[in-house]
Amino acid sequence: MLSAGIIGWGKCLPPAILSNADIATFLDTSDEWITSRTGISTRRIAHCSLADMAYVASAQALACAGLAGKDIDLIIFGTTTHDDQCPNMASGLQQRLGANGCAAMDINTACTSFLYGLSTATAMIRSGVVRTALVVGGELISPYMDWSDRNVAILFGDGAAAVVLQASNREEGVLLEKLGCYGDSREILRIHGMGGNYLHQGRLLGDTSWQFEGQDIFKKAVMGMGSACEDVLRRATLKPEEIDLVIPHQANLRIIEYVAKRAQIPMERVFVNVQRYGNMSAATVPVALCEALEAQRIQAGSLLLMPAFGAGLTFCAHLLRWGERITPMGQSNATLPPLTLSALELVVRYKSAKGSTLQ
């Protein structure tokens, strides 16, 4: 049976860095309070569009694979924070990459969107529908953030990353996955003000408040990711010690530690970058994957376990065998627009625009 190996990867982190000390200038909090509860020290705030970040990440992934846009048969864009919902994000990316005529679709399962997209692309390659696919995970969360709410404002950041999948006769790419959703818990993580419901409630679209029930989210996240990891390891007849590296969704250091403990995998074999970027939702796993490769934590043939959870409450775990190549074939010259404001200045702009129209 055909496999879908990852042959290219790329990331894009906007340069503006928002520190815990910056947040403490407008919220009643401190660096110690945030880091002790979340493990997060800094996060990125984008000065550009989601499309810009996705383009830079995707161009890098294509260069890494030694391919051009015309070689892509399918683009899957995983995100919750679309620049536009109609037309979709993937079609705009197709245009910018010169991937004329390829299939293009978005997937929204919140923080699991990239991994759900990875499953979708893998299945389409295995079935012969496409041969080469680009899967993107990206979020522009900062404009939708309720910057007056300490419970959520400290957690999230912006970013994007992408991978290129290609049909292979070797055993590589996604070997097994478990996808699921606790639909009865969808109300514990909800962003009010991001959908058509609010047109009838006197709320401007984009003027958000976050329903974020932290303790319930914690319990469901650990249960969902933990059970999904157990499921794929059982079906693969693998022991925890046979996993070379866990690359989990980076939402909160405590959640990561609890999932690793439940999976019986020591933290030495878990890749963590939540301290630098916070929760980038759909971007966390692919960004961490790119950085694990840069840090040489992944070698040819490595077995990777990638669990995640997101609003909905979706959860998943993917067992993946890395292919032969661990270094890029090329580099892209794609860059973001120039940065003219600091991260704190960008946040102040969003705060002042709340309840009005951005100028």
Image (cartoon, grey):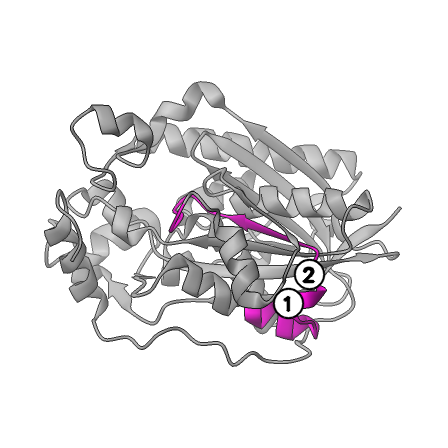
- The three-letter amino acid code for the residue at tag 2 is Ile
Residue 63 colored in magenta in the image: yes
- Please tell me in which quadrant of the rendered image residue 61 appears: bottom right
Q: Is residue 217 above or below residue 301?
A: above
**Side of 88 where 37 appears, left or right:** left
**Side of 168 where 51 appears, left or right:** left
Neighbor class of circle 2 (other Cα within 10 Å; few <14, some 14-19, many 20+) is many
**Side of 325 where 267 appears, left or right:** left
**Would residue 288 be visible to someone looking at this image?**
no
Task: Look at 62% across and 40% down and name the residue there.
Answer: 317
Q: Position of residue 342 (x, y in %)?
A: 21, 70
Q: Which residues are magenta?
A: 59-84
- The three-letter amino acid code for the residue at tag 1 is Gly
Q: Mark 2 — residue?
A: 72
Q: Position of residue 27 (x, y in %)?
A: 12, 50
- Please tell me in which quadrant of the rendered image residue 300 appears: bottom right
Residue 72 colored in magenta in the image: yes
Q: Mark 1 — residue?
A: 69
Q: Secondary structure at mark 2?
A: loop
Q: Quadrant of the C terminus?
A: bottom left
Pointers 2 and 1 in contact (C-beta within 8 Å): yes
Neighbor class of circle 1 (other Cα within 10 Å; few <14, some 14-19, many 20+) is many
Q: Position of residue 32 (x, y in %)?
A: 22, 56
